[in-house]
């Protein structure tokens, strides 16, 4: 990315051509186009979809006039032009060419540019190498011939996004406009900051304080942005101001520094240890507008500034014939911080100078202009100072979190911030010293899994990887324990079955349980412990049959042929266990029978009287591809648990089975949630909510729909196996770890998924399948935020192929492969898409016949 804009668009909808460069564009009005780069797209055949178009680039224009836009054929049929957003991507051979150039020539290129004192524009020169029409211009640029030779074999495409918006940050005023305008809801008002109590300072609620430490006695006005600063003492900051990298740790106790409304203040280090300088100006000052064209400083015309300060223009610009403007004015003195603050207030008009002392001090000082400052900034020192400042802030916040809180902060992120601190290892050791006081101080309040996660992160940060691995095992064991506690607390324990005192034979018992699989529309992850143990969850899913049958099942029968347990699966594998005491967790991940063994433990049948006089034969099957994402593992667990409860004549209600399966998943180490077994046990479409507590409460609400809607859904929804195998527990561990670290992006994404489940329920009840399609698309985007690897190239290509036919699509389950849901725009589109997929040589996929599994 280049430029001074912040793009706002759905990156998951970005379609990139193979072996080419691609620049993202957006249609804009001609007045905006005249101040930016414009892309001239080819009129020849390209890809033109509802939300985007993809065309070859014929030419590039830089800040063109309207006549130049017309002459260059850059004006679209609707009277707009394609704005260059500065987002450039290279794929395949184009990327290989770029990497080769960087590897082979980067050092010599930089050396030549520095020797010749020339500039190479990443934005203009690099992109021009992919556009033949620009080659004549590029050959006369520094290293232009080399760029054409290295990159010119590939072409540049324009990806025009019709639902794209962007925020332009060309001026300081635009920055504040965006922060306070229609996008203000996207902005956090406080982040990584240290603030005093509200009775010791005056900070407006609309002020944005980022990476800043503020002490008592400071006042900050409305809509002001303060970033990367330290403010202490009697400091008054007005409204709509911008303060960046200002470090005022000490100020004369009797003095007060005041920054008037609508002003900017920043502090920068100078190269070669020449000191630091404070820079200030008005929010709306244009540095390049001259004194003759009504240029301003601190919001006042230069004529008034000179008169009020009683100085001459020669004091600022000398006797040269250069443009007299803020950019070239030698305004800013290099002196001690208190002196710079006093002079700054005088120059800005917030302090009088009746005896001329400040004016004399300013005139005698070494002064620098913005133009000179641009070349004299020590950028390395600027970055180093910023990193150390943020590391110190992170350390202080982490200590406060450990001292006073319930570990609600993202300590992992704070540890990352602290790496720039010279004494970070000592800080980690200090933070570790707080354990185990937290568990003693907040018994029953702070989840042990969260405490172990924080301890593990601190151990890793301090370099004690061995102990960290040991603690990591405790993290997952704690989640399993907390889940079991939430399920069993207050409910009836599974029957232990007292041993019979007589020796009569028990009647043989046999049961067969067949269940559908589930497809989840939206809400997944909000059902997964420890989220569901601590926060409300909501999932919208549906039970379905595949290829005309219920694909998952278990057969369980008692036998007098042996007194052990014989287990057999549909792959022909079998095991006989005569020593029932040997069935205990944890199980090896490679154990093919750990699911059934875990169910034997959870149901309590191992201690039941039934096994004192007979054995068990258990056979399981799942006619679904491995790694399907259809909840097969949990649903198979549900079939086994339900069958065991039936044999024991215990509580086989769907609620009881669903709770037991949640514990089975934890014992197995897969860590799944409740939505899979709910999806398979309860027929039809349902919206299920969970409420944390002791016990965990599940509320399954059937979605009442008409037979006509069910028929339309069955006609429009394609359920397609992608051929990509995924393992849910690998993705799950990453997501659960991020939650335990209190990752704010993850938390907001899962909250939105749960909210979308409720919205989807209303859409289905109102018969709005198109709205459900939009929900699927947003859910898919959120899943990619939770795990960037939940998609892959074959899946992306499948969705790009299906997009013209569909109003929504996503992978089921955790993603990464398995089955996909493709919701077509209408039944006709569904038939066309199915035919296209089945006849395609590109996609090795299978479209399954399916039906909603309705109540019998």
Image (cartoon, rainbow, N blue to C red):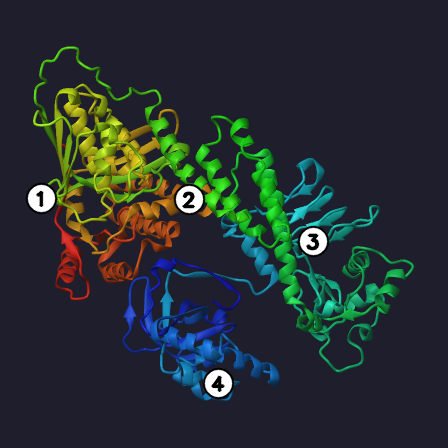
Q: Nearer the viewer, mark 2 or mark 4?
A: 2
Measuring from the top left, give residue 447's x and y in whole percent: 45, 32
Q: Nearer the viewer, mark 1 or mark 3?
A: 1
Q: Which mark is residue 144?
A: 4
Measuring from the top left, give residue 742's x and y in whole percent: 47, 42
Mark 2–mark 3 distance (CA, rounded to whole Å): 45 Å
Secondary structure type for disc 4? helix
**Badge 3 density bin: few <14, some 14–19, many ≥20, Cα 10 Å:** some
Is residue 65 in view from this perspective? Answer: no
Ranked by sequence position, the earlier of labels 3 and 4 is 4
Is residue 623 in view from this perspective? Answer: yes
Q: Which residue is mark 2?
A: 737
**Badge 1 density bin: few <14, some 14–19, many ≥20, Cα 10 Å:** few
Q: Looking at the image, is 277 positioned above or below residue 719?
A: below
Secondary structure type for disc 2? helix
Q: Which mark is residue 261?
A: 3
Mark 2–mark 4 distance (CA, rounded to whole Å): 48 Å
Ranked by sequence position, the earlier of labels 1 and 4 is 4
């Amino acid at each position: 990315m280049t430029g001074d804009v912040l793009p706002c668009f759905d990156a998951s909808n970005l379609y990139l051509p193979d072996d080419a460069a691609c620049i993202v564009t957006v249609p804009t009005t001609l007045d905006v186009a005249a101040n930016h780069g414009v892309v001239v797209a080819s009129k020849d055949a390209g890809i033109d979809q509802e939300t985007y178009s993809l065309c070859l680039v014929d030419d590039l224009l830089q800040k063109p006039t309207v006549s130049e836009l017309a002459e260059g054929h850059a004006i679209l049929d609707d009277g707009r032009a394609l704005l260059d957003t500065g987002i450039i991507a290279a794929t395949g051979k184009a990327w290989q060419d770029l990497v080769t150039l960087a590897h082979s020539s980067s050092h010599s290129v930089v050396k030549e540019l520095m020797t010749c004192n020339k500039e190479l524009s990443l934005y203009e020169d690099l992109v021009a190498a992919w556009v033949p029409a620009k080659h004549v211009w590029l050959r006369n640029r520094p290293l232009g011939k080399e760029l054409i030779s290295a990159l010119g074999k590939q072409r540049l495409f324009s990806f025009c996004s019709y639902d794209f918006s962007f925020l332009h940050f060309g001026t300081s005023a635009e920055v504040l406009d965006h922060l306070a305008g229609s996008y203000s809801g996207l902005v956090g008002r406080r982040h990584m900051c240290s603030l005093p109590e509200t009775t010791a300072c005056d900070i407006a609620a609309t002020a944005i304080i980022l990476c800043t430490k503020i002490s008592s006695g400071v006042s900050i006005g409305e809509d002001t942005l303060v970033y990367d600063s330290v403010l202490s003492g009697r400091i008054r900051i007005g409204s709509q101001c911008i303060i960046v990298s200002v470090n005022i740790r000490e100020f004369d106790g009797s003095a007060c520094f005041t920054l008037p409304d609508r002003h900017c203040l920043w502090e920068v280090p100078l190269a070669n240890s020449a000191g630091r300088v404070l820079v200030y100006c008005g929010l709306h000052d244009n540095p390049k507008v001259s004194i003759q064209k009504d240029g301003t400083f601190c919001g006042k015309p230069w004529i008034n500034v000179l008169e009020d300060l009683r100085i001459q223009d020669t004091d600022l610009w000398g006797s040269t014939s250069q443009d007299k403007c803020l950019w070239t004015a030698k305004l800013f003195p290099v002196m001690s911080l208190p002196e710079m603050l006093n002079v700054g207030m005088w120059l800005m008009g917030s302090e009088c100078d009746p005896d001329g002392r400040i004016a004399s001090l300013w005139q005698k000082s070494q002064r620098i202009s913005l133009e000179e400052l641009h070349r004299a900034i020590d950028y390395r020192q600027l970055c180093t100072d910023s990193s150390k400042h943020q590391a110190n802030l992170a350390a202080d916040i982490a200590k406060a979190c450990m001292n006073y809180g319930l570990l609600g902060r993202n300590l992992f992120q704070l540890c990352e911030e602290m790496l720039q601190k010279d004494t970070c290892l000592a800080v980690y050791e200090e933070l570790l010293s707080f354990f185990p006081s937290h568990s003693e101080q907040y018994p029953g309040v702070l989840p042990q899994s969260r405490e172990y996660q924080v301890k593990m992160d601190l151990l890793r940060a301090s370099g004690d990887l061995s102990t960290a691995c040991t603690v990591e095992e405790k993290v997952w064991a704690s989640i399993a324990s907390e889940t079991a506690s939430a399920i069993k607390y207050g409910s009836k324990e599974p029957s232990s079955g007292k041993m019979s005192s007589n020796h009569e034979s028990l009647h043989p018992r046999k049961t067969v349980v067949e269940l559908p699989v589930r497809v989840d529309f939206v809400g997944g992850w909000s059902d997964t412990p420890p989220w569901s143990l601590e926060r409300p969850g909501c999932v919208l899913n549906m039970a379905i049959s595949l290829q005309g049958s219920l694909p998952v099942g278990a057969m369980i029968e008692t036998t007098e042929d042996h007194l052990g347990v014989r287990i057999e699966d549909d792959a022909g594998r079998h095991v006989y266990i005569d020593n029932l005491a040997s069935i205990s967790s944890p199980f090896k991940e490679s154990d093919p029978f750990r699911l059934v063994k875990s169910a034997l433990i959870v149901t309590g049948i191992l201690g039941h009287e039934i096994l004192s006089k007979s054995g068990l034969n258990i056979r399981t099957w799942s006619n679904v591809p491995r790694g399907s994402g259809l909840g097969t593992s949990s649903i198979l667990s549900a079939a086994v648990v339900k069958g065991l409860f039936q044999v024991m004549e215990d509580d086989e209600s769907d609620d009881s089975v669903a709770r037991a399966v949640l514990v089975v998943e934890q014992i197995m180490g897969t860590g799944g949630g409740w939505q899979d077994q709910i999806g398979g046990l309860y027929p039809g479409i349902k919206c299920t909510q969970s409420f944390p507590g002791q016990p965990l409460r599940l509320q399954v609400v059937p979605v009442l729909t008409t037979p006509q809607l069910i028929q339309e859904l069955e006609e429009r929804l394609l359920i397609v196996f992608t051929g990509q195998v995924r393992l849910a527990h690998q993705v799950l561990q990453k997501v659960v770890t991020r939650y335990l670290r209190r990752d704010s992006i993850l938390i907001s994404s899962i909250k939105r998924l749960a909210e979308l489940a409720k919205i989807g329920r209303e859409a289905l009840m109102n018969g709005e399948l198109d709205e459900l399609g939009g929900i699927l698309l947003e859910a898919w985007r959120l899943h990619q935020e939770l795990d960037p690897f939940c998609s892959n190239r074959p899946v992306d290509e499948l969705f790009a192929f299906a997009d013209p036919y569909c109003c929504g699509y996503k992978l089921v389950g955790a993603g990464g492969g398995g089955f996909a849901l493709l919701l077509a725009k209408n039944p006709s589109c569904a038939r066309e898409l199915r035919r296209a997929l089945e006849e395609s040589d590109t996609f090795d996929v299978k479209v399954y016949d399916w039906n909603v599994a309705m109540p019998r």
